[in-house]
Amino acid sequence: MIRWSVVSLSITHRNIRQQLAALQRSGFRSKFRLKTVDRTYIAQKGMDTIADHARQFVDTRVADAFPKNDGRQTPMRGHPVFIAQHATATCCRKCMQKWHGIKKGRALNETERTFVRDLIMAWIERQLNDAFS
């Protein structure tokens, strides 16, 4: 169940489910998984803190029109949100344009920021739930 932010009218939970399903069909994107260390970190910090980290990372790493080091700004490990960003193609503006139609060269608006954060958190929640099913 998605609870971390209010989803705008133009971005629905259905959109998020559809995007996650499409990403899961990608050989590259579908290989990303949360490791035990990531799950432990989430359990220690709590989902609200992880959602806050997602907000911070989106705002500081990919929301600008021309992010610093675009294409290389998101590490491949070190934080559950980084893993989720690669799994959800929200790691750089090129991937966001290819997968989500969010054009490069302009800052993300609040609706797009919310969508990206909710997509990241939905992927993380799905990973956590899959571990127990």
Image (tube, rainbow, N blue to C red):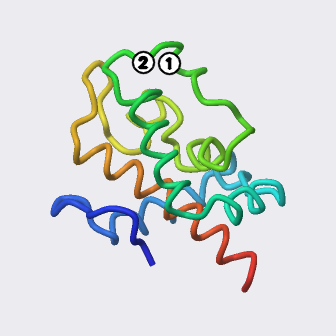
**What residue sits right under mark 1 in the picture?**
70
**Image point 43% across, 69% down: which residue?**
17
Where's residue 83, x and y in %?
66, 46
**Image point 60% across, 20% down: which residue?**
72
Position of 116 with respect to 73 (left or right) is left
Mark 1: few/some/many CA within 10 Å (<14, 14-19, 20+): some
Q: Secondary structure at mark 1?
A: loop
What kind of residue is marked 1?
A: Asp
- The outermost residue toward the left is 9
Contact, CB < 8 Å: mark 2 with mark 1? yes
**What residue sits right under mark 2 in the picture?**
67
Quadrant of the image containing the C terminus: bottom right
Mark 2: few/some/many CA within 10 Å (<14, 14-19, 20+): some
Position of 132 with respect to 119 (left or right) is right
Q: Is residue 94 above or below residue 43?
A: above
Q: Is residue 1 above or below residue 34?
A: below
Foreground pick, 29 / 46: 46
Quadrant of residue 105 within the rendered picture: top left
